[in-house]
Amino acid sequence: IHQSINLIAKFPTIIALAYQVLRHDQQGRSLHVRHPYENYSVAENFLYMMKGPGKYTELDVKILDLALILHADHGGGNNSTFSVRVTSSTETDTYSAVAAGIGSLKGPLHGGANVKVNGMLADMKKNIKDWKDVGEIDAYLTQVLNKEAYDKTGLIYGIGHAVYTISDPRAGLLKEMARELAKEKGRENEFAFMELIEERGVEVFLNYKKQGAKQRTCINVDYYSGFVYDAIGLPEEVFTPIFAMARIVGWTAHRIEELNFSSKRIIRPAYKNVRPLQDFIPMKDRT
């Protein structure tokens, strides 16, 4: 428990200082080392250490605080938390278990998704002349699904979730704060563009997959989180680390729960081969 509390407390400082070192060593910029204040919230301390005094607003703090709460936990089935639980079931140490979670979270289909959303939106801004033209937006999104646009993976980033279909409640809360933030920062046109992409993205995806009226999909929490972080002046390099800064709370809580099961069983999922049996071919006969 002491190790867990220690990690939760130190993650914001570790991330902020690591970024300051990165910008100094790799970008040749000044090295700013700012120590956290005891009377600041986690969100305000992080913005202070990243940006300096007087360079963030009350709304910046409020929305980052909300984002941290929304990302703090999402059950034991999400990939990174499950990785922590699986690793913890071997009774390894706290740091090894958390490292497993970080490795999982880094992936673009998990914690790195908001970076992909921002990249996709930047590409759309360059390639769509009229941000209000539904036809242009639909055509681009169809190209994405056909693996002809952006990173050619066939994924519309920020849309779809393994659990949520009607709505992701986290995304709804973050969207309303993002709307308020867009107004404060003078980015209302960009927000309106994202809203239209959200609307059209869901419809284009369902039509492309030929899913019936009963099948639905929705945006996930990653859709607006990247916009939020960018609007409050945080660099893309810390988008996924911010997710870790929040989710360390959930990771450590799940780890403690896992270690307190009386059965002390190791998690070992079963797998079933669904391919047809094949005859063995000697190495010399293989092509």
Image (cartoon, rainbow, N blue to C red):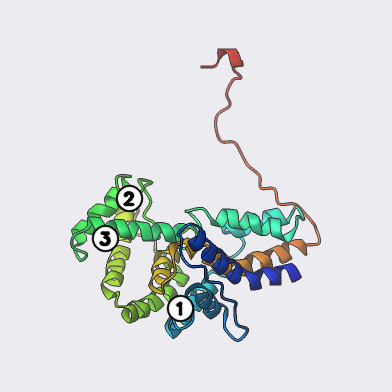
Q: Secondary structure at mark 1?
A: helix
Residue 53 visible in image: yes
Which tag, 1 or 3, sits closer to the chain's start?
1
- The vertical placement of 188 against 218, above or below, is below
Which tag, 3 or 2, sits closer to the chain's start?
3
Callout 1 crowding tier (Cα within 10 Å): few <14, some 14–19, many ≥20: many
Q: Secondary structure at mark 2?
A: loop
Residue 73 visible in image: no
Residue at figure coordinates x 70%, y 71% from the top left: 6
Residue at figure coordinates x 18%, y 60% from the top left: 129
Q: Secondary structure at mark 3?
A: helix
| Residue type, label 2 | Tyr
Give the camera-side residue of 285 and 6.
Answer: 6
Quadrant showing the N terminus: bottom right
| Alpha carbons under labels 1 and 3: distance apart | 25 Å
Name the residue tied to disc 2.
150
Where is residue 89 drawn, in percent x and y?
Answer: 73, 55
Return the mark for residue 63: 1
Residue at figure coordinates x 28%, y 48% from the top left: 143
Name the residue tied to disc 3.
125
Proximity of marks 3 and 2: CB atoms separated by less than 8 Å? no
| Residue 254: quarter of image | bottom right
Where is residue 86 drawn, in percent x and y?
Answer: 68, 54
Q: How many marks?
A: 3
